[in-house]
Amino acid sequence: MSDDLINITVDGKQLQARKGQMLIEVTDAAGIEIPRFCYHKKLSVAANCRMCLVEVEKAPKPLPACATPVMPDMVVKTTSELAAGAQQGTMEFLLINHPLDCPICDQGGECELQDVAMGYGNSSSDYVETKRVVMDKNIGPLISTELTRCIHCTRCVRFGEEIAGIRELGATGRGENMRIGTYIAKSVDSELSGNVIDLCPVGALTAKPSRFSARSWELTQHSTVSPHDSVGSNLFVHVGNGSVTRAVPRENEAINETWISDRDRFSYEGLYTDDRISSPMLRIDGELKPVDWQTALSATAKALSDAVEKSGPKSIAALGSAQSTLEEQYLLQKLMRALGSNNVDHRLTQIDYSDQQLAPVMPWLGMALEDLENLNAALLIGSNVRKEQPLAALRLRKASLKGASISFINPRVYPMNFDTASNIGASPREQLLHLLAVAVACGCQDELVTRIASEATVDDNHRAIADHLKSADNAAVLLGNSSVMHPDYASVRALASCIASATGAVFGYLPEGGNTAGAWLAGCVPHRTAGGVATETVGLNAAQMLDAPLETLVLMGVEPRYEQINSALARKQIANATTIIISTHLSRHAVDHADVVLPSAAFTETSGTFVNAVGAWQMFNGAAAPPGEGRPGWKILRVLGNELNLDGFDFNDVTAVRGELKTLCRELTLDNTYSADAIELPEPNTNGHELIRCGDLPAYKSDMLVRRARSLQKTVDARQNVVALNSVDLQALGLEENAVVSVQQDDSTVMLKVAQDDGVPAGCAWLPIGSTDVAGFGSLFQPVTLVPGS
Amino acid sequence: MSAATGNNGVLNAHTLEEIDEWLQRYPADQKQSAVLAALRAAQHQNNGFLTVELMDAVADKLEMSKIAVYEVASFYSMYETKPVGKHCVAICTNISCMLMGSDTIVNHVENKYGIKLGESTADGKIYLKVEEECLAGCDGGPMMQVDHVYHMKLTPEKVDKILDSLD
């Protein structure tokens, strides 16, 4: 190791550096400031801005620190007359074509060009001629362009090519005519596109939703954690006038590196909408009316205790959210269990709960997030990781670029931002057959597999997946969001675990929500209390709750009509039972049917904890106050506990709640070991003409906040009102693309446009849940009929 | 990633054959090396200019991202990305030719067709290209290039003869 270290001198300071490092890496680590625009530690070296010129002894000219490898005994001067002169000259040239109108620029006050010009430039310029002007382009709802300000550093171009894996922006033309853009009129659709806003050192690319809404010095910065996916990206939210005006990444190399997804960046827009609840409400004479907290809380307590008294504790139930804080989830289940009911769940998108007793105490990745980069082979099942956990996908992409063979068996072909070995999209039954074929190809000797091995048709794809997993030093079999929604989840999980054990691969999960892992730890499931302790009796799961004769239903941070597989049933149950809603927002349906509404705080407005895919407990504090009379969810539940005279609800602060749960989880070790006890193949669909509705919960429909984030909803990924069919089915039905059809299931009908999409398996009608067009419409994985409409 | 989606007949058989020939000269995993030749062939197929459709077909054929092909096509002056006339007439106006009277030639041709440099005739026959760089025919200035052919020591009469003989 010491052979690799060399000594250099920078500004008279002795520094140690590794051979092959670029000078700027060494000076950055030593805290020596060198100005730069095009250099970024996560991107390739372009050396095109020339701002980092420094003097190196024995070199005839100033050298760019970003592209100069360190040499033994190198002597560098970063502030000498030569270096300063070179930097000043570069600065003057960069400003020739850059408008000097910082007061009207959105970036003003937080602009690298402005800062560096102040620090290293001249106070006046010799250039008096006209400046170039570039027309702005519309590149979608998230990013504003003001391309006259562009200094051609190409960070945004390199980000697309090297990090996001989808090259959308480019530098066309040359010389003075060079410009950044998409060349043709096109939106930038990457799920990570917002990162170019941070990368842009000038005001050329800025955040469209928050543009011109505040100056950086008027904002306060608060650390928090994203609730949307199980990576748990670290964020800063910027608050002005008491509300969140934007979200930016908070660097954490072990979690989100320096990036965040667009969903994490722009979901804050959902915080402030017309349907945000500002006061407790009670249904009086058939209408929801604002009341004071005491009245609402008493009514809630009464609804719960009356139901228990009249029809027993089994007549009450609660649905929690995978986006709620750990403390909220813990107190929700504690409240229900103190009232004698195990009817508490957070798994709204699940259908098959048959193996829940075998599930790990906390489903987790099975490795560190960083380890994803070192995989040589992976099989992801039911996972659109690129959209659902974009930062995990970036790690897999790095593995793929190093040669890893990554395969997918999914409910449809999801396009990835890296090369895949196999990318299979299949109907629910076919997915099981693919998994079985891979298990057979792996030589799995489990009796459960061998018993039905004859059903499998093993082809080269399956053999390749098996060989990759077996021969890899680091291999993983991971279950994603859609696997949990599979009608035979238990069989999917059993086959996946068989494949993992037959190949020696790590068996892991990409938990669905930002705090899915937390919900398991907190006991927000009907068969286990906090810390994973099995309950004596098993309560109703989220699907059973829809069909049970319930007196009172508590919904905390969820909208079952959007989030449950069977939206029609969810709608009916909420209308039937006395429904208590603890939530930030109130959907139309809730306005019609809720009986008590308690306004709670969003993740930016409360203290709490999210547990991510690797089991990290990430604590955060509120950044802004909830609007109106909203209160943090844990406080609402705490007071409800007092109101109901239940023991163990006298918490003074949120840390006491967290501490209590932490003690209960003290003994836990994370372990995904799964001993399969059944694999069942459903009967083949004999009605050849019947289409089965398939779908997932799309990333931009995932939760209450995201569904209300205006700009995200304008993106291509949030598209709705469309049913997608394979071209085979489109032809068989004699339908044209964009034709209007009426989609029917049982008593529900919805009018949609038809899209041709060969990523959808034949025999499936791709119509995901989560959007307004299908709220209240039927159920996933059931037959649908398409009738051409007008 | 950019899966080859087939070119749906945008590139004709001759162009595809030419691209394939060029591809043989480069390693299989570096198909983008053939982009200059491929764009040239595509432009030739389309009577002298590229369309987005053609560039997209080249991108698919070479498994490149589309924007990367647009970058190349918009960078080099030998590619036209807007519709231009069939015959490309590039009169050199660099230093040697200028000293030898290229201005007279340019004026003559502009008046002859009633268009300026950078424009095409209404009948789509002639395109007066703005030649940015020296065409290395200094010994015969003033000179011009018409569809890849050099014509030296030009006079207005000689120019008329050359241009009038174009079909």
Image (cartoon, helix red, strand yellow):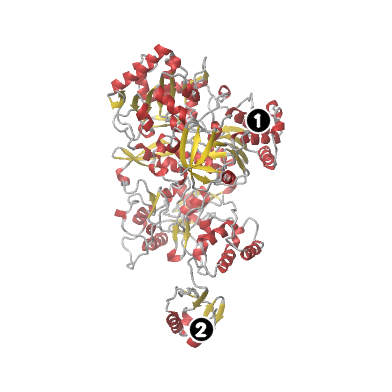
The percent coordinates of residue A142 (x first, y second) are 41, 47
Q: Is residue A739 left or right of residue A288?
A: right
Residue sticking out furthest to the top: A309
The percent coordinates of residue A119 (x first, y second) are 35, 55
Which residue does the numbered mark 2 point to in the structure image? B141
* Placement of B92 over or under A473, stated as above or below: below
Quadrant in the rendering for residue A653: top left
User: Which numbered tag is attached to residue A498?
Assistant: 1
Viewer-closest of B111 and B24: B111
User: Which numbered tag is attached to residue A779?
Assistant: none
Residue A166 visible at all: yes
Q: Is residue A312 left or right of residue A441?
A: left
Read off the chain for label 2.
B
The percent coordinates of residue B18 (x first, y second) are 63, 65
The percent coordinates of residue A581 (x first, y second) are 37, 26
Q: What kind of residue is marked 2?
A: Gly
